Image (cartoon, rainbow, N blue to C red):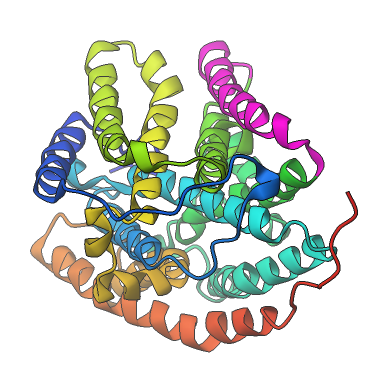
């Protein structure tokens, strides 16, 4: 049976997914509706924005929940004989993008005035993201040299190693219509994010404050137009609409916009709306899927609509909505703290488990295959935790030794 691609947003779209998720979300929201915690009034301009120090625990939990979505989707849905109703990885991809935009935007607004902002930002970002990523890439390529293209590694196209080391593998993915070595398929999102990190700080630092929000809106609209051109014209390979930064710009820019809103707008009157918008967005995506029989409008617009819902949900959490308490669960926060390593290594773990025990690629067609897949979950979590403790946390802590200067950037 033909291998289902890993992590594509298009693959995961299923009406049953939306309906079941909507029912679950409605129950959660209905039970939780009540007065949200009050939040201090927001300043009226970027120049007056006061920093919001400290880590937002609820966002760690949200990241952890999305990590579980990825595991469920890749292990039980996006494989041969997978269960389509469990294909919820697209939700995680969009939420990760919006969350990344929000956190980066919040950091720039708080620290962008420091004279050494760019150097400290990129040094910290490198120590935070590169070590685990390079570890994962090098291990996979070493495995391909040792065992070759074994069936359980699922290597249809082997891209040059330098493409992964330069975060340009998404170019090869788009041109070949394939995600390359299957264990590294999720890294397309990392290539998009690393390219995004080159753009976002410049927007905030060099654009006048009054132009920032229009620029973010323009970037969001550009993503819609880009996808429409790719899907409708055939001028570019179809996968370009998914794995290139312009096609993913709307969730990232909507995350940046959410950070600006959070820092500059008094949201006290909008707490209820922030909790309703995700429901409206989800319902709109379902309606669009049902009404757009040709699929063109759905493919062009559903990510933007869903990302608006993601941005509103993030804002509701940081505002202290009742849902934030569930996201502060120690279990979810554990998964949130180990999410990066688990995300990058979980495909390798399940592939090795199936290869070592059954000699085949991951599948859930038989009871033995299902048992190995289920057993891979705690192994992937444990391995991700070890990688986090040994590689990610020490080097991230080292990166944080580079501190923001007291000298402010000249305006």
Question: At which x and y percent is residue 323?
Answer: 23, 55
Quick check: is 198 in the magenta stretch? no
| Residue drawn where x is 47% and y is 54% of the image | 186
Q: Is residue 145 above or below residue 92?
A: below
Looking at this view, is 160 or 149 the one in front?
160
Viewport quadrant of the N terminus: top left
Question: At which x and y percent is residue 99?
Answer: 47, 51
Q: Is residue 306 above or below residue 199?
A: above
Residue 7 can be seen, yes or no: no
Viewed as shown, does residue 199 lie left or right of 358? right
Determine which quarter of the picture holds residue 114.
bottom right
Question: At which x and y percent is residue 117?
Answer: 78, 62
Viewed as shown, does residue 58 lie left or right of 47? left
Viewed as shown, does residue 370 lie left or right of 158? left
- Main SS category, magenta section: helix
Looking at this view, is 236 or 245 the one in front?
245
Looking at this view, is 269 or 342 the one in front?
269
Quick check: is 225 in the magenta stretch? yes
| Residue drawn where x is 48% and y is 45% of the image | 98
| Residue drawn where x is 28% and y is 50% of the image | 79
Residue 22 can be seen, yes or no: yes
The stretch of residues the image draws in magenta is 206-235
Looking at the rendered structure, the number of numbered marks drawn on it comes to 0
| Residue drawn where x is 39% and y is 49% of the image | 314
Determine which quarter of the picture holds residue 124.
bottom right
Determine which quarter of the picture holds residue 247.
top right
Question: At which x and y percent is residue 43?
Answer: 57, 45
Looking at this view, is 313 or 272 the one in front?
272
């Amino acid at each position: 049976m033909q291998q289902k691609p890993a992590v594509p947003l298009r693959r995961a779209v299923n009406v049953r997914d939306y309906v079941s998720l909507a029912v679950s979300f409605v129950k959660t929201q209905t039970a939780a509706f009540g007065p949200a915690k009050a939040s201090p009034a927001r300043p009226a301009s970027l120049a007056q924005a006061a920093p919001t120090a400290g880590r937002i625990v609820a966002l760690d939990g949200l990241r952890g929940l999305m990590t579980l979505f990825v595991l469920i989707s890749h292990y039980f849905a996006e494989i041969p004989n997978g269960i389509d109703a469990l294909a919820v990885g697209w939700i995680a991809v969009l939420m990760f993008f919006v969350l990344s935009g929000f956190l980066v935007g919040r950091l720039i607004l708080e620290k962008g005035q420091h004279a050494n902002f760019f150097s400290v930002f990129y040094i910290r970002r490198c120590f935070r993201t590169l070590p685990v990523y390079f570890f994962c890439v090098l291990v996979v390529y070493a495995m391909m040299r040792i065992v070759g293209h074994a069936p359980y590694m699922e290597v249809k196209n082997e891209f040059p190693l330098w493409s992964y080391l330069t975060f340009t593998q998404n170019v090869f993915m788009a041109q070949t219509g394939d995600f390359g070595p299957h264990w590294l398929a999720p890294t397309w999102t990392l290539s998009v994010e690393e390219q995004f990190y080159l753009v976002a700080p410049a927007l905030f630092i060099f654009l006048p404050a009054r132009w920032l929000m229009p620029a973010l809106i323009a970037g969001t609209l550009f993503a819609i137009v880009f996808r429409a051109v790719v899907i409708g014209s055939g001028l570019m390979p179809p996968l370009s609409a998914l794995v290139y930064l312009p096609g993913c710009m709307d969730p990232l820019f909507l995350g940046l916009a959410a950070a600006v809103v959070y820092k500059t707008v008094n949201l006290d009157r909008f707490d209820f709306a922030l909790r309703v918008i995700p429901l409206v967005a989800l319902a709109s995506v379902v309606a669009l899927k049902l009404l757009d029989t040709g699929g063109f409008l759905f493919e062009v617009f559903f990510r933007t609509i869903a990302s608006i819902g993601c941005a509103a949900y993030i804002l509701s959490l940081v505002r202290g909505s009742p849902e934030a308490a569930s996201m502060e669960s120690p279990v979810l926060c554990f998964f949130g703290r180990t999410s990066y390593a688990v995300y990058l290594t979980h495909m390798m773990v399940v592939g090795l488990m199936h290869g070592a025990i059954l000699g085949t690629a991951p599948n859930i067609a038989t009871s033995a295959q299902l048992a190995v897949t289920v057993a891979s979950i705690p192994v992937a979590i444990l391995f991700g935790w070890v990688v986090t403790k040994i590689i990610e946390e020490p080097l991230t802590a080292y990166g944080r030794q580079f501190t923001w200067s007291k000298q402010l950037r000249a305006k």
